[in-house]
Image: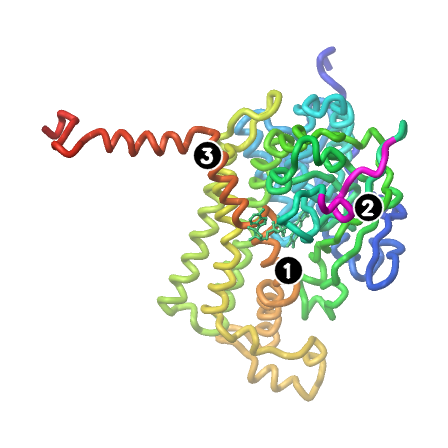
Amino acid sequence: MTSTQIAETNNLMTGATYLDSLNDGREIWFDGERVKNVTEHPAFRNAARSMARLYDALHDPALKDDLTTVDKFGQRTHRFFAPAYSADDLAKSRKAIDIWQRINYGWMGRSPDYKAAFMAQLAEGHSFYDPYGDNALQWYKKYASQGLHLNHVLIDPPLNRAKGRAEVKNVYLSLDKSDDKGIYVSGAKMVATGSALTHATFVGVNSGTAARMEVGRDEDMALIFMADMNSPGLKLISRPSYELKANSPFDSPLASRFDENDAVVVFENCFVPWENVLIFRDVEKTKQFYAHSGFFQRFNLQAATRLAIKLEFCIGLLIKGTEASGTSQFRGVQAAIGELVAMRETILAMTTALVSDPEPGIGNSVVPRLQTAAALRIYMTNAWTQVRNTFETVLAGAPSFTISSVRDMHAPELTHIIDTYYQGSNLDGRSRVKLFNLVWDSLYSEFAGRHGLYERNYAGNKEQQRLDMLRWSTVRGDIDNSRALVDRCLADYDADGWVNSVWK
Ligand SMILES: Cc1cc2nc3c(=O)[nH]c(=O)nc-3n(C[C@H](O)[C@H](O)[C@H](O)COP(=O)(O)OP(=O)(O)OC[C@H]3O[C@@H](n4cnc5c(N)ncnc54)[C@H](O)[C@@H]3O)c2cc1C
């Protein structure tokens, strides 16, 4: 080892240490009761185990090289948890995201690599947060070295979008007071996906929320910080659990293990130590951090890689479903499947553009090109509606030709009925019911409905996505280029004929 080389450390969690770390006294409310240990509670247990598998993969000798790297501090970490310094680094990060996402078939969008889109950049961009820049750097080190799982809350509760943030101060998150130990905050934020299974929540604002903030008015709400999940005064109010409602893996093969519970985060005089604060009472910085951080460009790489796998899964479902129904050779059915395949290929190709045509990020890092990421976001958030539409028209009513629960499979009186009447073209009755239960959980169950809502909304409201596209293209000069292209064409001619001598 030369004097410039740093000794490698590997403190990445395993599945077991990850599960242990969640039993930390956090305050989660579910069904009128405080959850004692989230990893054993039937509403969260299997989702926690699905997440734990990702941590075990980090230590699998067969996957370790593709999944992990050593960062500039000598810490072994997931490749996407470290900044990328070249297109090659981004391509390797995509591969690592792909490996993790495949483990859960693309059905857990908020695996720990999602927030790595933001956290990795703190290694390079920590000084942006000065005078709290060192906090940002320490958080990067802690995050990357252990492979922490963070959720984030960027959105205010849907109370009154027509009012300024300060006018809704009793509900929106704001500062109560600060002292030499830290800050105290109260208010609610929506909605912290997967938060019950994370180590900390990143509290910030997205582009839409920042646009509603004003200097001189919103200082008490201009706060960006990390809150450990067991912070005093932090409460998670969970939505219903589809995992809990799942009777069996046979009935609910996805909901029973991949339900990333979304929760409202309520802060009541919650204490946040200074070392967790990144921005304090600074409206300008709060408005800038989102665009500056590289989070936007990078989260779209994670999200698109994940969605491509989910689509791959759905293509498989559609092909197997149409084969079972004996419709797979029909021309219209094949055309519809072809369109779904094209959708997946488009998303994959756009991830290739994201990794192979990057732009400078903060420090020495590179990040995917902003406009490509913005266009991909719009394409992706439209995609799921189209997937659902294809299933509804191509598989039509076949998923509803089913039984009430797995218990019917064990009722001797029903054996010959299922064997005879439920069979498919190429499947016995039991296998056909099993396949279509998976279709149901993917597209039509309550779990699936939430996925539809997620895909449409997780990246911001529909209009804001398009406004961001236009604003960023304007700032980057693309819109001026469009104008110039038309102006040059207009200058070719006038009412007297051709101005440009080529056509005279
Ligand atoms: C399943 C799920 C999981 C989620 N997970 C997370 C998470 O982990 N973390 C997180 O921070 N968020 C999360 N979200 C929230 C998500 O980011 C928001 O739902 C999304 O940004 C849209 O914001 P909104 O729901 O507040 O809609 P709004 O922004 O209120 O939009 C509603 C409608 O009002 C219009 N509108 C809003 N403001 C204006 C205005 N000023 N002028 C004109 N029109 C306006 C919009 O165009 C839209 O048509 C999640 C959402 C879902 C559904």
The span picked out in magenta is 167-178
Q: Position of residue 128 (x, y in %)?
A: 68, 24
Question: Which secondary structure, mark 2?
Answer: strand
Disc 1 residue: CB within 8 Å of ligand 1: yes
The residue lying at 67 percent from left, 31 percent from top is: 215
Q: Are marks 1 and 2 in contact (CB under 8 Å)?
A: no
172 in magenta: yes
What residue is disc 2 on?
A: 267
What residue is disc 3 on?
A: 473
What residue is disc 1 on?
A: 450
Q: Front-most of 464 and 109? A: 464
Which of label 3 and label 1 is nearer to you?
3
* Position above or below: 374 against 412: above
Question: Which secondary structure, mark 3?
Answer: helix
User: Which amino acid type corresponds to the residue marked 2 in the rendered image?
Assistant: Phe
How far, Cα to Cα, is label 3 from label 1?
32 Å
Q: Residues within 10 Å of mark 3 (few under 14, many from 20)?
A: some
Question: Which secondary structure, mark 1?
Answer: helix
How far, Cα to Cα, is label 2 from label 3?
37 Å
Whether residue 193 is visible to the viewer of this picture, yes or no, is: yes
How far, Cα to Cα, is label 1 from label 2?
25 Å
Q: Residue 202 occupies which quadrant of the picture?
A: top right
Q: Position of residue 4 (x, y in %)?
A: 71, 12
